Image (spheres, grey):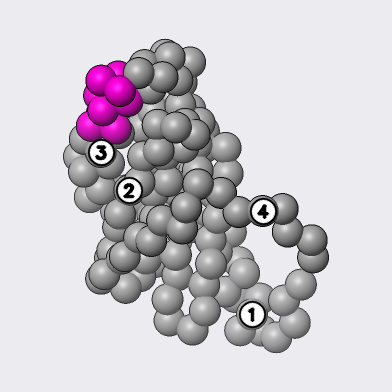
Amino acid sequence: MPTTDQELARHRIARQVARATGTFEHLLTGRAPRSVTVVCDGDWLVVSLHGAFSALERRLAAEEEGASRVREFHHYLFENSLDSIRSHVRRSTGVELRGAIAHVDPGTGSVIKTFTTNPAVELFLLGQGLPGMVL
């Protein structure tokens, strides 16, 4: 739980950005994302939206050609809505999202959209899964 005024402010902004990006995704696709993750520290912020494919997209993604079509569709949506989502988040929260990247994984049915306040975003895929973690 945040303890300082600065941590409280960051936590509040993170919640606002998560809500704004989740709402935009719902407006864009008709489906709310399964989860929205926001990480911020200092002067940077990263937002990842994780969402399941529709039932049709899951069926299409089961075959190689269909998986390619689903991937292309989600990249098309991402590229063509990028300016709109940036404007929506800026109007809703005052946060300027500058860098953005999308990863579509037909194998898991995940569409992960990552935005940062930094102009550059790099995506590193770390394998097919991580073993269970105990905290």
Q: Nearer the viewer, mark 2 or mark 1?
A: 2
Would you place residue 36 above or below residue 55 in this image?
below
- The residue where tag 2 is placed is 102
How far apart marks 4 and 1 lie (CA) works out to 31 Å
Q: Is residue 73 left or right of residue 8?
A: left
Comparing 80 with 20, the one in front is 80
Question: Where are the magenta residues, as a range?
Answer: 64-72
**Image-quadrant location for residue 59:** top left
Alpha-carbon distance for marks 3 and 4? Answer: 29 Å
Q: Which mark is residue 64?
A: none
Q: Return the residue at label 1.
A: 7
| Left or right of 92, for residue 33 | right
Q: Residue at x 35, y 46 (%)?
A: 103
Query: Which quadrant does the N terminus fall into?
Result: bottom right
- Pointer 4: residues within 10 angstroms few (<14), some, or many (20+)? few
Query: Which of disc 1 and disc 4 is earlier in sequence?
Result: 1
Q: Which residue is mark 4?
A: 131
- Checking the image for residue 75, the label placed there is 3
Check disc 2: other Cα within 10 Å, few if <14, some if 14-19, many if 20+: some
Q: How far from the left and from the top, in percent, is residue 12? A: 60, 66
The amino acid on which the numbered mark 3 sits, given as a three-letter code, is His
